[in-house]
Image (tube, coloured by chain):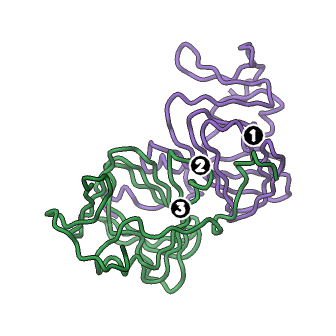
Chain colours: A purple, B green
Amino acid sequence: MPADFSTAAIEAASAPAKGPVLPFPEPFASLMKDRIRHPLGVHFGITNFGVNLTFLPPGSISALRHFHSHQDEFVYILEGTPLLVTRAGEMPLRPGMCAGFKAGSDNAHQLRNRSDTMAVYLEIGDRTGGDVVTYPDDDIKIDKMPDGRLQVVRKDGSPCMVASSEL
Amino acid sequence: MPADFSTAAIEAASAPAKGPVLPFPEPFASLMKDRIRHPLGVHFGITNFGVNLTFLPPGSISALRHFHSHQDEFVYILEGTPLLVTRAGEMPLRPGMCAGFKAGSDNAHQLRNRSDTMAVYLEIGDRTGGDVVTYPDDDIKIDKMPDGRLQVVRKDGSPCMVASSEL
């Protein structure tokens, strides 16, 4: 195959998985530790938005219930029956369903797999700068440290206890 | 369901389909006339990127082979076996495969369904301004008219003959 075939397609599940972006404290870390994300867009050099193929095992959550200030988000269910959790409650999803979360809407969302089978979905989010993520249910926020890195802290800015294995 | 449930999920295929964005001349119009796009992101008020659920019947193409100057593009195959056509030739796709097209890369792309079954895929593109689409194989370009609307013209700027039924 010619070297210039930078747009050659791939089997999405073959893309390398990535670990957690940020270390969360318990009990949240355990709810997310078995979630597996395969970043897809980055494989093709895409930078304007990200696409993950995500595997959510029984008992896992996609993230803490949250909303974004500037970045839109979208999910499309490929397999399984996760729940969409928002302010309105829990909505059962199935393959072929999708949901979108407009930046700035404070109706925070989360997927939660209460079934006994794997849920698989695509999640898409853009990379608009200045984004702030808010977690209305939990005493958690994300702060930017002086060196530019992000860290998970309590809402009053105090540090979270994070197991060293998650760092 | 409460009125504030703006993030309620939907069956993607139930989202209203949209017609062609721009009228193309023959022979291109016929190759695209049976393609059905269901815009999904707009249903949720998403504006930073677009997501379409697209049905590509046998004999149809996704678009003329093209590339974008500023907008990244990504496709994920849900059903069927369309071909990915790029400078490198034709690559057969199948469900679970994906491809991405970085803005500015001149390796133009297209999906073409040469099989005898429907192909179904998600296509995602961001909305970065100033985008220009280039069609290297065909005597086609898209011009902005004085009133801001876009139209398909020949590369020398002369008009295309477009059947009135497509207007």
Q: Secondary structure at mark 1?
A: loop
Asked whether the beta carbons under mark 2 and mark 3 sit within 8 Å of each other, the answer is: no
Q: Chain of mark 1?
A: A
Q: Mark 3 — residue?
A: B52
Q: Say which quadrant the C terminus of chain A sits in.
A: top right
Q: What's the distance in space between the residues labelled 2 and 1, CA to CA?
A: 31 Å
Residue position for label 2: B45
Regarding mark 3 in the picture, which secondary structure is present there?
strand
Left or right: A40 as drawn, with respect to A24 = left
Q: Which mark is residue A33?
A: 1
Q: Earlier in the sequence, mark 2 or mark 3?
A: 2
Which amino acid, mark 2? Gly
* Residues tagged by mark 2 and mark 3 found on one chain of the structure: yes
Q: Position of residue A83 (x, y in %)?
A: 80, 52
Looking at the image, the residue that sits furthest to the front is B147
At label 2, counting other C-alpha atoms closer than 10 Å, the crowd grade (few under 14, some 14-19, many 20 or more) is some
* Residue depicted at 81% across the width and 51% down the height: A113
Q: Quadrant of residue B80?
A: bottom right
How many numbered marks does the figure carry?
3
Task: For mark 3, name the chain.
Answer: B
Which dot, 3 or 1, sits closer to the camera? 3
What's under tag 3, amino acid-wise? Asn
* Residue at the image point whose x is 51% and y is 76% from the top: B81
Three-letter code for the amino acid on which mark 1 is drawn: Lys
Quadrant position of residue A66: top right
Q: Which dot, 2 or 3, sits closer to the camera?
A: 2
